[in-house]
């Protein structure tokens, strides 16, 4: 679209360093540029100006065609729409495609497929089905399995739990988090769930109108309710509730962790204090 | 209570599948109600939704919409005019090269005259806050923008029943509430019946009635106040407790003597205040 009257600038002057091993949540309202930013990270889109560096590979505006293969082996992306990344006749072949492409033997790729399908909570019988005959949430799980099969060092997840049932959402997020911790991954999670962002991320980046609007620790970001509202976002439910309780009780409690358990603890302690 | 849709003893198998995907499902949809359908991935929700406007036909049993039957070739156009569907992935639903054309195409199918068409397009696009995108190509929109356009396309057709199949799953939390409020206004003011398939438990909580699907069967049906108190049912259907219920439980765990679990934050704050 560059140079045509239809050109829209989706991103503008983004500077963001993501240290090794960070769990970064990228949040922002619909259309703020999250998916566009993510597609720059593995060379699917090239910047009109500026550069992107991952490890030793650099993608520059106007630069020559890079060896994207090693970059793509390093970074596994789960796309926003899973059906865009599924294409083989069977689920098994689909999951095997990545490892095969990078030289893994047929036998070993098959074993990997069986292993990852279980990790994402699907029965083995799914392996012989066509990915296009699956329900939306099942497709999402297969797309995730395909990325896990590649053993990436960097996990890039674009709304990976959209379409999952509530129990599956928790299971899959716990799975990502345990992989992140155990294998020392760098993880970038695009999410609309402020709960997930607050629970799992070390850092949160907020996008607004194609720009990086806020960047900091969850405790910093979620104390900025007004700023978030300006960007079309809100704080997690736990913070919303605590604010209601603060208003009612005249207290000024704040959360350091954003779990329901932590909230319950704070509220019950405040009740006990009043009781005395 | 007048029924707008009746599903009677419906069993359905996809071609080549051994076990049926829907097993003896019966369901009455009341005229003017907001009905939420929840359940685990692969439980048969989307399959059931496609039964309601005759995209899929029962292997056994029948689906009636008003006085029409989906299985009768003479009735199918009336059924489709009465029941509008917004799919899980809007990409599969776009045909036009611009947002405007896309919505117009749907209206042409139903023989809406030109002047009326323009009026309806402008109205429906404004309702979902997408006026600025009338000439944009649907495929170039962000995920959440696509969902808004798909909803506008259905609103423009003025159906009696709107079926939303996870139609807000890609929206940010505030955008989600805006779109749901828009549909709710149609539901309340114009009496349009809404069937919303969702994994968003907070949305299901505000429905008039909830249906729980589990492995192709209807596992439960009732008002949200009853459905969401049934822990075991929710767990076995891949669901979770909504926020305020979870917090009520966690508070009791901390020794707070709540008389019951509350469904909304407001009710819970008020109940806590009485204990203070
Ligand atoms: N075209 C198809 N051919 C064969 N099987 C199918 C087809 N579409 C869906 N299925 C299977 O039917 C079952 C029900 O699928 P359905 O799409 O109705 O589930 P769902 O409840 O909407 O799930 P989700 O929450 O993931 O969207 C699943 O086991 C799925 O794999
Ligand atoms: N292929 C494309 N061509 C032109 N504009 C696009 C394209 N894809 C997305 N956009 C626009 O770029 C902006 C950012 O989109 P996106 O990165 O998908 O947002 P998000 O992921 O934050 O919802 C939106 O205004 C969208 O309409
Ligand atoms: Mg996106
Ligand atoms: Mg579905």
Image: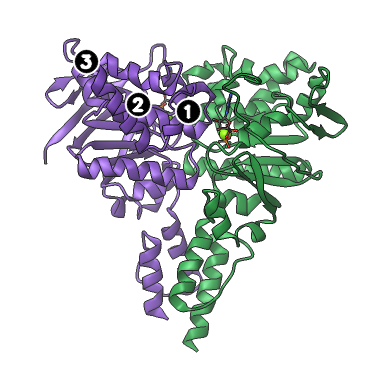
For the colour green, the matching chain is: A
How far across and how far down the image is residue B11, in percent? 28, 22
Q: Is residue B93 above or below residue B155?
A: above
On the image, numbered disc 3 is attached to which residue? Answer: B77
How far across and how far down the image is residue B111, in percent? 23, 15
CA gap, disc 3 and disc 2: 17 Å
For label 1, being within 8 Å of ligand 1 is answered yes
Which of the two discs, 2 and 1, sits closer to the camera? Answer: 2
On the image, numbered disc 2 is attached to which residue? Answer: B153
Q: Which mark is residue B228?
A: none
Which of the two discs, 1 and 3, sits closer to the camera? Answer: 3
Q: Residue at x 55, y 70 (%)?
A: A265
For the colour purple, the matching chain is: B
Ligand 2's quadrant? top right
Crowd band around label 1 with a 10 angstrom C-alpha radius: few (<14), some (14–19), many (20+): many
Q: Is residue B149 visible?
A: yes
The chain letter under disc 3 is B
Query: Relative to residue B71, is residue A273 drawn left or right?
Result: right
On the image, numbered disc 1 is attached to which residue? Answer: A136
């Amino acid at each position: 679209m560059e140079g045509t009257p239809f050109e829209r600038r989706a991103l503008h002057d983004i500077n963001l360093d993501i240290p090794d091993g960070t769990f970064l949540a990228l949040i922002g309202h619909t259309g703020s540029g999250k998916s566009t930013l993510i597609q720059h990270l593995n060379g699917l889109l090239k910047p009109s100006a500026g550069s992107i560096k991952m490890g030793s590979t650099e993608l520059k505006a106007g630069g020559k065609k890079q060896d994207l293969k090693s970059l793509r082996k390093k970074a596994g992306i789960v796309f926003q729409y899973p059906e865009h990344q599924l294409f083989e006749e069977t689920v098994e072949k689909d999951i095997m495609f990545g490892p095969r492409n990078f030289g893994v033997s047929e036998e070993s790729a098959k074993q990997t497929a069986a292993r990852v399908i279980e990790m994402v909570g699907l029965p083995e019988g799914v392996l012989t089905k066509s990915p296009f005959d699956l329900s939306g949430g099942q497709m999402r799980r297969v797309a995730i399995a395909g990325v896990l099969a590649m053993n990436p060092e960097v996990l890039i997840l674009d709304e990976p739990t959209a379409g999952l049932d509530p129990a599956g959402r928790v299971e899959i997020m716990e799975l990502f988090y345990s992989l992140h911790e155990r294998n020392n991954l760098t993880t970038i999670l695009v999410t609309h769930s402020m709960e997930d962002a607050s629970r799992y991320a070390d850092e949160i980046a907020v996008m607004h109108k194609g720009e990086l609007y806020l960047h900091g620790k969850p405790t910093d970001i979620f104390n900025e309710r007004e700023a978030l509202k300006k960007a079309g976002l809100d704080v997690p439910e736990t913070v919303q509730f605590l604010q209601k309780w603060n208003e009612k009780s005249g207290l000024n409690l704040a959360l350091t962790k954003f779990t329901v358990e932590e909230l319950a603890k704070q509220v019950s302690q405040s009740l006990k204090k009043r009781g005395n | 209570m007048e029924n707008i849709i009746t599903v009677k003893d419906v069993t359905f198998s996809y071609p080549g599948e051994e076990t049926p995907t829907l097993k003896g499902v019966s369901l009455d949809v009341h005229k003017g109600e907001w009905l939420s359908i929840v359940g685990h991935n692969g439980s048969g929700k989307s399959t059931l939704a496609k039964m309601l406007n005759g995209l899929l036909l029962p292997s056994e049993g029948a689906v009636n919409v008003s006085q029409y039957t989906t299985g009768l070739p003479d009735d199918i156009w009336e059924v489709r005019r009465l029941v509008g569907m917004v799919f899980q992935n809007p990409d599969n639903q776009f045909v036009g090269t611009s947002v405007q054309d896309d919505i117009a195409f749907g209206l042409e199918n139903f023989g809406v005259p030109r002047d009326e068409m323009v009026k309806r397009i402008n109205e429906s696009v404004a309702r979902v806050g997408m006026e600025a995108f009338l000439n944009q190509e649907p495929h170039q929109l962000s995920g959440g923008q696509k969902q808004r356009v798909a909803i506008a396309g259905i609103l423009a057709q003025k159906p009696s029943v709107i079926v939303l199949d996870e139609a807000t799953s890609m929206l940010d939390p505030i955008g989600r509430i805006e779109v749901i409020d828009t549909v709710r206004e149609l539901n309340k003011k114009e009496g349009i019946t809404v069937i919303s398939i969702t994994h968003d438990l907070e949305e299901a909580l505000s429905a008039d009635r909830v249906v729980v699907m589990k492995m192709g069967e209807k596992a439960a049906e009732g008002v949200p106040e009853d459905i969401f108190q049934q822990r075991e049912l929710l767990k076995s259907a891949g669901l979770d407790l909504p926020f305020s219920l979870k917090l009520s439980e966690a508070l009791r765990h901390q020794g707070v003597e709540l008389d019951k679990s509350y469904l909304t934050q407001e009710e819970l704050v008020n109940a806590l205040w009485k204990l203070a």
